[in-house]
Amino acid sequence: SAGTVCSTPPWFFQHMFVPKGKTWQFAAQIKQVLNIPVIFVGRVNSATDVNRLKNEFGAEYIALGRALIADPDFIGKYEKKIAGRIRPCLACSEGCLGGVRSGQGLACVVNPTVGRDKPEFGKTDTPGQYAVVGGGLAGMEAALMLKLRGHQVVLFEKDKLGGQFNLAWLPPNKESLKEIVDYYIYELKEHDVPVIYKEATPKDLLNGNYDAAIIATGAQPAIPPIKGLDKFYWAEFLLDENLPENKKVVVIGGGLIGIEIASKLVDKNNDVIVVEMLNEIARGMEMIEKNMTLKKLQMKNVPIYLNTKVSAVDGDKVYLIGERQVLLENVDHIVVATGMKSHRPLADALKDKIEVHVIGDAKKVAKAQEAIRDGYMIAQNL
Ligand SMILES: Cc1cc2nc3c(=O)[nH]c(=O)nc-3n(C[C@H](O)[C@H](O)[C@H](O)COP(=O)(O)OP(=O)(O)OC[C@H]3O[C@@H](n4cnc5c(N)ncnc54)[C@H](O)[C@@H]3O)c2cc1C
Ligand code: SF4
């Protein structure tokens, strides 16, 4: 199982930050020289993985761990005795390891039923007609679950299904997060949930004869008022085609998003400086990701200013004020990652005109686990 919990935690927990399949190779080599059963283990999270292990690696025994937390029906679905695609474990360790470690108890980012007393819900006795606005994780989970319960549902998305989570898998080593977006897109199609690609307006929702509107319109970056700050980026640099090279970049905000952008920027030899007004760095980041990313930034000599604010920007100069005053010169780009704010203008516009439920980041800025749980809960309650 590749190490021990204390000496090599990312390997031991088969975290998304270590390459998938290494333990499969080790097991195959060991199997060649032993005459006792060898069990293959490590990030087996799909039917394709099981087939590869059987056919390419000659596996006779396979162990599933977190994959069964993410989807307890894994084996039934693999054997086609239960309908549906396997809900993939993302190897994020956020809800399971993170939940246990924090004392909140076992949970799962992608499986909102974990840790609940009454996880099952069946078909509704009173089918209704619902509009879900916003095809991020919260909206997709709500739309899918409403449909599975027997309601009529349409999903409005003005851009791309996946919402912010389409950015979440772009930082280094986080590709596995994309799998949950693919899962929802597949399942929505499979269950004939109509997706209307347009920006929903109050008129769309009031004229649609809906019993209620579920507003899952997410969050947008919160930009602090800084004198002279007029040209800046947010998460655009996470896309390879936008990623600068050999530039000097100041990242304002050392939370999860700011640190991930910094990590992506240093891979292209950018000279990165992180400025954080609090005394804490990488706030909100999962423990293993945090340790590995901060270690990487340390090795790349990225200066991180804590308890420090950007007081002003003047052309290519950035002024910092904290325990001491610092002037950063010849700055090419500024990234502002100082948090998100809920975006729900539709909820205000529809108030008292139609039943409205606000879920996900639109209700309260949080993370994927909360967004999916909100989507599940609203479908359970309607
Ligand atoms: C760079 C980055 C990294 C992240 N990393 C992680 C991570 O590692 N782990 C984690 O748990 N979380 C992470 N998050 C946070 C996570 O992505 C969000 O908390 C979660 O995806 C929120 O989902 P949501 O459905 O509530 O909102 P969103 O994803 O914001 O979805 C809202 C959707 O509504 C659509 N929309 C808005 N208005 C309308 C309208 N009028 N009509 C139609 N459509 C509309 C938008 O286009 C969007 O698709 C990250 C976020 C970012 C930006
Ligand atoms: S929290 Fe993440 S790693 Fe843990 S079981 Fe769920 S998806 Fe897998």
Image (cartoon, helix red, strand yellow):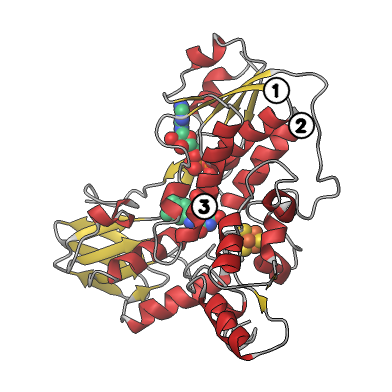
| Amino acid type of the residue that numbered disc 2 sits on in the rendered structure | Asn
- Point out the tag, 2 or 3, that comes first from the N-terminus: 3
Residue 192 position within the rendered picture, expressed as x and y whole percent measured from the top left: 58, 26
Question: Residue 370: in sight, yes or no?
Answer: yes
Q: In the depicted view, which residue is nearer to us: 309 or 176?
A: 176
Question: Dot 2 corresponds to which residue?
Answer: 381
Q: Name the N-terminal-most of marks 2 and 1.
A: 1
Disc number placed over residue 265 in the picture, else none? none
Query: Which residue matches tag 3?
Result: 179
Can you give x and y, in whole percent of width and height, for residue 139 in the image? Answer: 57, 35
Question: Is 332 on the left or on the right of 323, as rendered?
Answer: left
Q: Amino acid at mark 1?
A: His
Count residues near mark 2 (Cα–Cα under 10 Å), then give few for <14, some for 14-19, many for 20+: few
Q: Is residue 186 above or below residue 239?
A: above
Disc with the residue nearer the chain's start (1 vs 3) = 1
The reply to whether discs 1 and 3 touch (Cβ–Cβ < 8 Å) is no
In this view, the mark in front (2 or 1)? 1
User: For the point 45% across and 46% down, which residue is it?
Assistant: 164
Secondary structure found at label 3: helix
Q: CA distance from mark 2 to mark 1?
A: 12 Å
Q: Is residue 363 above or below residue 23?
A: above
Q: Residue at x 59, y 84 (%)?
A: 2
